[in-house]
Image (tube, grey):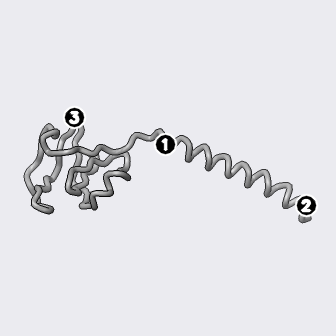
């Protein structure tokens, strides 16, 4: 009985590792978010809804024809791990694509 389970488990485990590896490989090619250096690069901004470290937080911003709504505040390091539909504006304001 043990040999039968091993004969089934080992190929399934190998297949699972192979699928996981392929998934990890192709995730490298997913487009990352956008890190903008200043508000000057933005095409349009909505009314101000607050401030963070002296910089304005807008309800939404438009960058290269795409609208991003305010999502949250993050540390400056967050710009290195942006998700696909996010826009980072220093000092740490993150917007998410609508």
Residue 3, numbered circle: 2
Q: Quadrant of the N terminus?
A: bottom right
- Secondary structure under the numbered disc 2 in the rendered image: helix
Image point 21% across, 50% down: which residue? Answer: 89
Query: Counting residues from the N terminus, which is met first, the one under dot 2 or under dot 3?
Result: 2
Q: Is residue 71 left or right of residue 49?
A: right
Label 3: few (<14), some or many (≥20) within 10 Å?
few
Of badges 2 and 1, the one in the foreground is: 1
In the image, residue 85 sits, relative to residue 9, either above or below, namely above
Q: Position of residue 12 (x, y in %)?
A: 75, 53
Q: Nearer the viewer, residue 25 or 47?
A: 25
Give me the C-alpha separation between circle 2 and circle 1.
38 Å
Image point 44% across, 41% down: which residue? Answer: 30
Give me the C-alpha separation between circle 1 and circle 3.
25 Å
Query: Counting residues from the N terminus, which is met first, the one under dot 2 or under dot 1?
Result: 2
- Secondary structure under the numbered disc 3 in the rendered image: loop
Q: Residue furthest left?
A: 47
Q: Position of residue 54 (x, y in %)?
A: 10, 60
Q: Which residue is mark 1?
A: 28
Q: Residue furthest bottom?
A: 2
Q: Which residue is mark 3?
A: 65
Q: Position of residue 91 (x, y in %)?
A: 20, 56
Of badges 1 and 3, the one in the foreground is: 1
Q: Nearer the viewer, residue 96 or 83?
A: 83
Q: Is residue 15 left or right of residue 95?
A: right
Give me the C-alpha separation between circle 2 and circle 3.
60 Å
């Amino acid at each position: 009985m043990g040999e039968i389970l091993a004969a089934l488990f080992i190929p399934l485990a190998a297949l699972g590792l192979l699928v996981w590896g392929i998934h990890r490989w192709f995730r490298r090619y997913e487009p990352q978010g956008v890190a903008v250096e200043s508000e000057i690069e933005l095409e349009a901004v909505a009314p101000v809804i607050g401030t963070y470290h002296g910089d304005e937080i807008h309800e939404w911003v438009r960058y290269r024809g795409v609208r991003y709504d305010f999502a949250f505040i993050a540390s400056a390091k967050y710009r290195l791990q942006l998700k696909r539909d996010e826009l980072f504006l220093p000092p740490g304001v993150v917007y998410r694509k609508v």
